Amino acid sequence: MEEILVPLLERVRRECGRLTFGKVRILKTNLDEAIEAAKKAAPPPMQAPEGFASSPLRSADPFFGVLKMGCESTTARIVEASLNAIQVLMSHGFLRGTTRVKGAPRAAGPPEDAIQVPGEGDEPGRNSEGSNGDSGAPPQGTLAAPPATPPTRDDTRPLMDLIIETVCE
């Protein structure tokens, strides 16, 4: 994996060039650290038996953070190199996104003001068609209100969610 990961990270680093302002400087520092970490994890040549490649790195998930920073850059060449690295690592099966990361997931679905709570603005006991609403179900065409108590969950989510958000933005 290192023989693919290191050149990809080095390409992103080259695209940073001589830029030394703001986030690019931080990105360059993080890229240098990631490249060194990937090189240290690479096995020395001729250590593995013939035809068998042993690699301590089995996933590129820990290196996604620096690629995400590259995607958030305002320089198109850095963004292109970062997206290319993500695509290559995913296509080779090294960037799997199975790791759990901290962060609240983005809200899926319509915004809060688009949710129509059944019975708001209607007479009590009547639905939008004017008949008695004994079934308790919201009228067709409306979204049900969110539950009063949200389900409990931890503050982590799959890295794949973050990868998809990064690529799609």
Image (tube, helix red, strand yellow):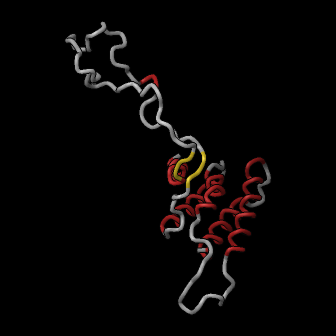
Write the residue at 27% across / 23% down: 137
Query: Which corner quadrant holds the N terminus?
Result: bottom right
Residue 95, compared with residue 54, is above or below; it is above
Query: Would you say residue 77 is visible in this rendering?
Result: no
Seen as rendered, the residue at the extreme top is 123
Q: Residue at x 27, y 21 (%)?
A: 136
Residue 89 at x, y percent in the picture: 54, 66
Along the horizontal axis of the image, is 17 left or right of 71? right
Q: Is residue 134 left or right of residue 86?
A: left
Q: Residue at x 60, y 77 (%)?
A: 55
Residue 120 spot, x, y in % from top left: 37, 13
- Image x and y of residue 5, in percent: 61, 70
| Residue appearing at x 62%, y 68% in the figure | 8
- Whether residue 118 is situated above or below residue 130 in the rendered picture: below
In this rendering, the count of numbered labels is 0
Q: Is residue 160 left or right of residue 137?
A: right
The residue at the far left in this view is: 131
**Front one among 90 and 129:** 129
**Residue 144 versus residue 15: which sits nearer the camera?**
144
Find residue 163 and report its horizontal and vertical position in percent: 53, 53
Q: Nearer the viewer, residue 67 or 61?
A: 61
Q: Quadrant of residue 127?
A: top left
> Can see residue 52?
yes
